[in-house]
Image (cartoon, helix red, strand yellow):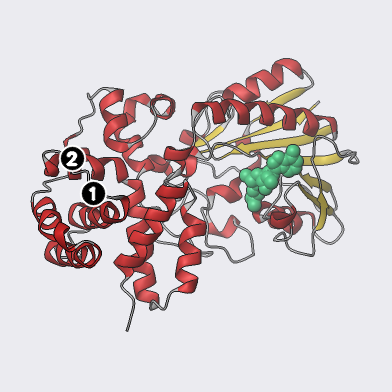
Amino acid sequence: MSQDPRKVAAQVIEHILKHKSFSKIVLSNALDKSSLSDRDKALCTELVYGTLRWLPSLELSVNRAMNRPNPKLQLDLKCHLLIAAYQIQHLEDSIPAYAAVSTAVKHIKKKRPGMAGFANAILRNLGSSPHLALRPSDSLDKISKALGLPIFVLEALPQEELLEAALAMNARPKTWYRGGGEGEHIVPSATLSKTPYVQDPASQLAGLLVAPKVGEYVIDACAAPGSKSRILKEAVGELGRVIAVDQDAKRLAKVPDDIEKIHGDVCKLKLEPADAVLLDAPCSGYGTLRRHPEIKFWRSYEDVQRLAKLQAELLEAAAKVIKPGGVLVYSVCSPLPEEGSEQIANFLDKHPKFTREDPKQTLPWLPEHVVNDLGEIMLWPHRDQSDAFFAVKLRRR
Ligand SMILES: C[S@@+](CC[C@H](N)C(=O)[O-])C[C@H]1O[C@@H](n2cnc3c(N)ncnc32)[C@H](O)[C@@H]1O
C-alpha cells in the first residue's frame, strides 16, 4: 500500500518538535526511508517546511478554533492539525480544504478514535491566518507573536519595510539552478560558479567577492562543505592554490577532492600567509529562516552572543595570515549587526591596517541598494529574493 505524504510530514514535524532537531536532516532521512513517489516527496517537503515556517500563526489559529485547550491533544495529533491548517490557510489554490480536513481526521481517528469529531470541528472552525491581519503599523510584539520571529531579529530588519521584510523571512524560497531559475537573481547567472548548483546564489557572492587572480594562493578559512572553495579554485586556476580549512572532518570530506584540505581549528593552525582569505563564518543562520525555519525556535540571543565572540576570534586568526596588500572577505547568513556591521566595526577599530573596499570595484554589476554607505553588502529576502546575507571585502594596506 502506498504511503501518505501527509502522514510522513506529520511524523517528521513531530520528531523535529520533540527532539529540537533540524528539518533538513530529519526530512531527508524520512524521505530516503519512505516509499513515496517523487511527487509525494515534493508535497511532503512542502508540508514540512511550510508548517514549520508558519508554525506560530498556525498554532494561534488552532488554539483560537479550540475555544479552550484540550489536554488530550497530544503532539502527534496536533501535528496533523497543524499540517491541515497549513494547507487550508496557505495552499488553498492547490489543495481543496475538504481533502486537507478529511486526511487529517482519518489519521487522527486511527490513532485516537474518540478525537476525530473534535479534530473535524477545529479544522472547520479554523478561519483565516493571523498573519493576514497584520498591519505595517503593528507593534514588534504583535508581529513577533504572529510570525514567530524573535524581537531582536525584527529590530535588525529594515524598519521602513518591516512587515514586508518579516513576511519574506517566512516565504518559500525560489530554487535556483545554474543558468537560470524562476526569474532574475541579483547575481547574474553568467557570473556564477561553473559547477552545477541548486542553492541560493547569494551564498556564492562571498566567493565571487574575493576574486583572486590566476596563480594566487587563497585560504578558505571555514570552508566546508566547500561551495565557495569551488569558486575560488576556478578563479586561481591550475597555477594557483586554494586551501580549504575546517574543523569538522565530516563536512570537510564533502569539499571537492581537487582542493587541498586541512582539518583543524583555524585559530590554532600555523598557515602560510595568503593573498586572500575567505572567512564565511559560522553564524546564527537567522538569514536562512526560509530554508531552516526551525532556527527561530531553537536559537536564542545567547547563541548570537556566543557566535559573535567566535566570529571575532576567527577574524583575528584570519587577519594574521594575510599578506600586505592582501584581501579578507568576511560573510555571514545573518541580518544581525552583532554578526555583521558591528563585528566588522570592532575588527577595524583593532586593526587600522585593514580598510573596507568598495565591493563594486570587484563586482560592478552589484545594484546600488545592496551596498551600504560603508561599502558593506547586505541582501534581504524581500528585496533580493535571497537569504539575508552580509559580506564585506577588507584590504590590508
Ligand atoms: C557557514 S559554514 C561554511 C560554509 C562554507 N563556506 C560553504 O560555503 O560551503 C561555517 C563552517 O565553519 C566551520 N568552523 C567553525 N569554527 C571553526 C574553526 N575554529 N576553525 C575551522 N572551521 C571552523 C564549521 O565547521 C562550518 O563548516
Q: Position of residue 46 (x, y in %)?
A: 35, 60
32 horizontally vs 67: left or right: right
State the image coordinates of residue 314 (x, y, percent, origin top left): 73, 32
Q: Is residue 46 visible?
A: no
Neighbor class of circle 1 (other Cα within 10 Å; few <14, some 14-19, many 20+) is: some
Q: Amino acid at mark 1?
A: Leu
Residue 167 shows in this picture: yes
Separation of marks 1 and 2 at Cα, in angstroms: 8 Å
Q: Quadrant of ligand 1?
A: top right
- Which residue appears farthest toward the top when viewing the image? 349
Estimate the x, y position of residue 55 in percent, counting from the top left.
Answer: 31, 45
Location of residue 102 by image quarter? bottom left
- Label 2: few (<14), some or many (≥20) within 10 Å? few
**Which secondary structure, mark 2?**
loop
For label 1, the residue is 73
Q: Is residue 382 above or below residue 5?
A: above
Residue at the spot of label 2: 69
Residue placed at 56% from the left, 31% from the top? 303
